[in-house]
Amino acid sequence: MIATTEQLVQEYIKDAIECAKNENQPKLVSLVKKVRPIDPLIFYANGHDQFYKERFFWKDPNSYYTFVGLGYAHTICTNAAKERYFHIENEWKRFIKEDFYKNNQISPDGTGPLLFGGFSFDPNQYREHYWSDFPSSKFMVPTVLYTQVDKEGYLTVNMMVKGQDSVKKHINYFEEVQKLVLCEEYDGESHISPLLLEKEEIGVEKFKGNIERATTLIKQQAIEKVVLARQLKVKFNEDISTEYVLQRLLKEQPTSYTYILEGEHQHFIGASPERLVQKQGDYVFSTCLAGSIPRGKTRQEDHELGEELLQDPKNLIEHDVVVHMIKEAMNSYCYEVEIPSTPSLYKTKHIQHLYTPVKGRIKEDVTLFSFIQKLHPTPALGGYPQQEALPIIRQLESFDRGWYAAPLGWMDINGNGEFIVGIRSAVIQQKEAVLFAGCGIVADSTPESEYEETRIKFNPMLSALGGIMRGTH
């Protein structure tokens, strides 16, 4: 049963206040109410005035799970590089055990005190100013959460109560929040694209030179594959509206995970086609996504390009490296693993990829964070072997990836959740945005072809921001 009646809510808050008084420490009260479904973008926009810089948005490609968080009731973060996954998981377990006031009411997965956040790609990279709001690890429990599960809507309000608080204070806040965020007056179409003033590709020649250096190392058998990335900076005539960019991403990239996490100075936003790991009860799911080609201008051309990708030796090698590593990782934590013998195609608006899904039945006491630690970075984002690839990336790339290509996602109090990799992304700061794109380098990679691949991969975010690079689809 979900706490919806006024009497139940009053009793729950009263008991939590009494518990906080007895234990002499604040307790988080989580009120969950089933509500009429609302457009998640409207819910997000309704929180702008009160919760701006403390919002997040997440939608999976099937629109089964959509989350919108407003305000940060509790934050867990660290800048430490060593054992960061262990730190976040332990703090979350401690919070649930000590700070969260539990009751006997049952609510759906993905409601209640949801944990949302992510990790940086490489905590040992030097930090750049435009990632100042995104440390090695950062997770939040939202104050207000809208969850849409299979077209059903749920509102969660998380409040920290103290022993001296009054029940009425929290009842009033619960009612005020509902009026604020469940209003449907926002008109998302009112936002227009800002004027693009500058567009600068950073370090193109260095990037091409890095590809030559990487292929030399691969031919010398120092490594099998390495993923190299580059940056694109854009500047507009006014502050970038996250509502506008989200609206564009949702419309243009429906087969991708759409996400944003706001910070005090920067916002990380994107539309990623790639799941890292999902946990549902005793089962986990991962995705091998590597090898890409543009979409065609016509249906026939699109089909021919897809068939070319399915037969291309360079892309098949790149994909097989990812499949091999993920299968090994899954085998170490699962009783059984299911994986197709050949890849299929995964198509987004601008790009089509080689795609292989993976499913496993997990062993006892294996958590979602265990898989994140084991899998990140996969060969699709870092290289192979994993530990040999990371130093090469640090050596060749002259910028901080931050949360680009890193794990981002959610987990509920039952341990279920899903993490993606933050690709097709940008970090926004007022009028400027820095975009990131990378490509997998194997022995027969060429600088010009990999450069063109990254140009295509910039397009989802460029289009959402208001500009497309010339000469691409």
Image: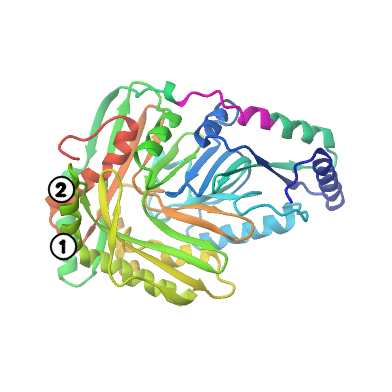
10 Å neighbourhood of mark 1: few (<14), some, or many (≥20)?
few
Q: Quadrant of residue 174?
A: top right
Above-or-below relation of 33 to 356: above
Residue type indicated by callout 2: Glu
> Where does the image place residue 180, in percent across and percent down from the top left?
64, 28
Cα distance between the residues tagged 2 and 1: 16 Å
Question: Residue sitting at 46 percent across and 71 percent down?
Answer: 360
Nearest the viewer among 56 and 46 is: 46
Element at badge 1? loop
> Where does the image place residue 405, in percent across and percent down from the top left?
37, 52
Residue 369 in view, yes or no:
yes
10 Å neighbourhood of mark 2: few (<14), some, or many (≥20)?
few
Q: Which residue is mark 2?
A: 301
Q: Which residue is mark 1?
A: 312
Judged left or right of residue 316, residue 7 is right
In the picture, the quarter occupied by the C terminus is top left
Residue 398 in view, yes or no:
no
Above-or-below relation of 197 to 166: above
Question: Residue sitting at 37 percent across and 27 percent down?
Answer: 431
Give, as a single range, the part of the protein colored magenta: 177-188
Q: Nearer the viewer, mark 2 or mark 1?
A: 2
